[in-house]
Image (tube, rainbow, N blue to C red):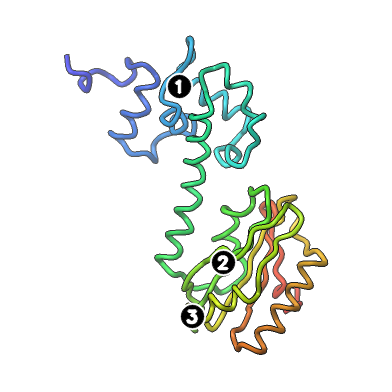
């Protein structure tokens, strides 16, 4: 009898997730089933789904799988989960994050508030272990022209280059921009360096006539807006 005519429930667990995805769509799969597809096969009595459940029991959510230290995965190395599979899992989670940002660039939504910016960039920035500085360029209707990564720093301090930021703004013919960076420790309150940079940003806009609308700091599911705080 052909395999597709047999009930999915009679298949090995590692096969059921793939067939369920193809037959009903990826949105119908649980987190452990999606993870099992990346893992592909089990190990010594553990199915791929069993192994996926153990991983999620440790890390709680798919979000927490990325930006983890290799030492956090050591207990799974003896269960057939080698460095290649661990890399594949982390890459898949990162692809999901980047897809959202790519969709935003294509759809070019209007930015009306700091909350709009946080909704777009928080999923990408909140879990990073080092500071990353991004800039959103807007047209005259406050619609996104582009989102660029302008700098990458240590866990304590990003080092964005004002000249590079405004050079990219001129290239994009952007009359407005919004600067965004993350605080890996999770507290979005601005540091002394953040305040100093914002003052420099405002000073530069007076010369180049490209208005900086806001400087937003992303924390752990929270953010700080210089504009909302009345500092811009």
Q: CA distance from mark 2 to mark 3?
A: 16 Å
* Residue drawn at the location 66% of the way across and 67% of the way down: 160
At 64% from the left and 49% from the top, the residue drawn is 128
Instruction: Look at mark 2 in the image and give the residue it sits on.
Output: 116
Between discs 2 and 1, the one toward the N terminus: 1
Q: Evaluate if marks 2 and 1 touch, with contact meaning CB atoms under 8 Å apart.
A: no
Spatial CA distance of label 1 from label 3 is: 48 Å
Quadrant occupied by the N terminus: top left
Looking at marks 1 and 3 on the same chain, the residue that comes earlier in the sequence is marked by 1
Residue 133: x %, y % from top left: 63, 62
Q: Going from the N terminus, do you reach mark 2 or mark 3 first? A: 2
User: Tag 2, which secondary structure?
Assistant: helix
The percent position of residue 139, horizontal first and vertical second, equals 49, 80
Q: Mark 1 sits on what residue?
A: 48
- Toward which corner of the image does residue 178 lie, by quadrant? bottom right
In this rendering, the answer to whether 13 lies above or below 98 is above
Foreground residue among 176 and 32: 176
Label 1 packing within 10 angstroms: few (<14), some (14-19), many (20+) = many
């Amino acid at each position: 009898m052909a395999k597709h005519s047999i009930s999915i429930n009679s298949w090995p667990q590692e096969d059921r997730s793939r067939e369920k995805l193809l037959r009903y769509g990826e949105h119908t799969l649980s987190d452990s089933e999606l993870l099992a597809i990346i893992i592909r096969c089990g190990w010594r009595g553990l199915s791929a789904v069993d192994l996926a459940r153990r991983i999620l029991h440790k890390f709680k959510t798919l979000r927490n799988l990325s930006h983890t230290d290799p030492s956090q995965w050591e207990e799974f190395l003896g269960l057939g989960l080698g460095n290649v599979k661990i890399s594949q899992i982390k890459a898949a989670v990162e692809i999901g994050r980047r897809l959202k940002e790519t969709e935003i660039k294509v759809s070019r939504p209007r930015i009306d508030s700091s909350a709009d910016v946080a909704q777009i960039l928080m999923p990408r920035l909140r879990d990073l272990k080092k500071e990353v500085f991004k800039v959103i360029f807007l047209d005259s209707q406050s619609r996104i022209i582009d989102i660029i990564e302008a700098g990458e720093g240590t866990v304590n301090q990003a080092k964005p280059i004002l000249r590079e930021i405004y050079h990219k703004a001129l290239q994009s013919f952007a009359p407005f921009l919004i600067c965004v960076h993350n605080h890996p420790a999770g507290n979005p309150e601005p540091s002394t360096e953040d305040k100093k940079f914002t003052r420099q940003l405002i000073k530069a806009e007076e010369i180049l006539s490209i208005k900086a609308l806001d400087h937003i700091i992303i924390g752990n599911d929270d953010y700080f807006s210089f504009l909302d705080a009345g500092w811009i």
